[in-house]
Amino acid sequence: MSPTPSTRHLIVSQDLSRLLGNFFDGKPCRVFPAPTGVRLSDSEAVEPDLMVVCNEKQIVMSHIEGPSDLVIEILSTSSIFHDRIRKLNLYLRSRVPEYWLNSPYPSSVEVFLLDGEGYRLDSTFARTDTLASLSFPGLAIDLATVFDFPVEPGEEAAFVREGRPAYGAV
């Protein structure tokens, strides 16, 4: 049995689901949260944390048939390898056009876009950024509203200031 999601995982999932649902309201795309199953092939099925499906023919009573238009996974310590390696490759083989990897800590989102035969990391967004999707024009998400939970002492992200090296003359 998998461990239950952390409260941070649930906050990110709920807030993204609400924001995406509001954006797609009245549009042909629908947002599905876990535990909605997706049948990618006769031998491969997954349950992404969130997904957007724009082809109504894929929506059947018990699951989604085929790859969705956007898949969102929320990382946790127990799923990092699975989401970053196994699922990324599975979504790539299935030709999912856009894949978001969300990390509650440190709060960030990596956006991967299908590019030929592979994924390309298109953008990385921090807690203070606004995520804008290339696949869905007009979709902009203020990540401060998604990562809306307290940061514990010692969890603050360190800012690195790059400059000239302190050693030797250049």
Image: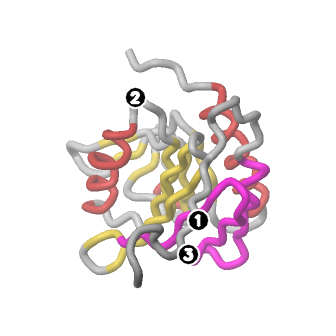
Where residue 63 appears, as percent x and y from the top left, is: 46, 42
CB-based contact (under 8 Å), mark 3 and mark 2: no
Marks 3, 2: nearer the viewer: 2
Q: Nearer the viewer, residue 45 or 42?
A: 45
N-term mark: 3 or 2: 2
- Position of 115 with respect to 145 (left or right) is left
Picture disc at residue 161: 1
Where residue 6 appears, as percent x and y from the top left, is: 59, 25
Check disc 3 and give the amino acid type. Ser
Residue highlighted by disc 2? 78
Query: Which residue is situated farthest in the bottom direction here?
Result: 170
Picture disc at residue 135: 3
Where residue 125 appears, as percent x and y from the top left, is: 60, 62
Q: CA distance from mark 3 to mark 1?
A: 33 Å
Mark 3, secondary structure of its residue: loop
Where residue 141 appears, as percent x and y from the top left, is: 72, 62
Q: Residues within 10 Å of mark 2 (few under 14, many from 20)?
A: few
- Position of 163 with respect to 120 (left or right) is right
Query: Which residue is situated farthest in the left direction here?
Result: 43
Check disc 2 and give the amino acid type. Ser
N-term mark: 1 or 2: 2
Check disc 1 and give the amino acid type. Arg
N-term mark: 3 or 1: 3
CB-based contact (under 8 Å), mark 3 and mark 1: no
Query: In which image quadrant can residue 5 be found?
Result: top right
Q: Is residue 138 magenta?
A: yes
Q: Considering the image in quadrants, where does the C terminus appear?
A: bottom left
Picture disc at residue 82: none
Question: Magenta part of the protein: which range?
Answer: 120-146
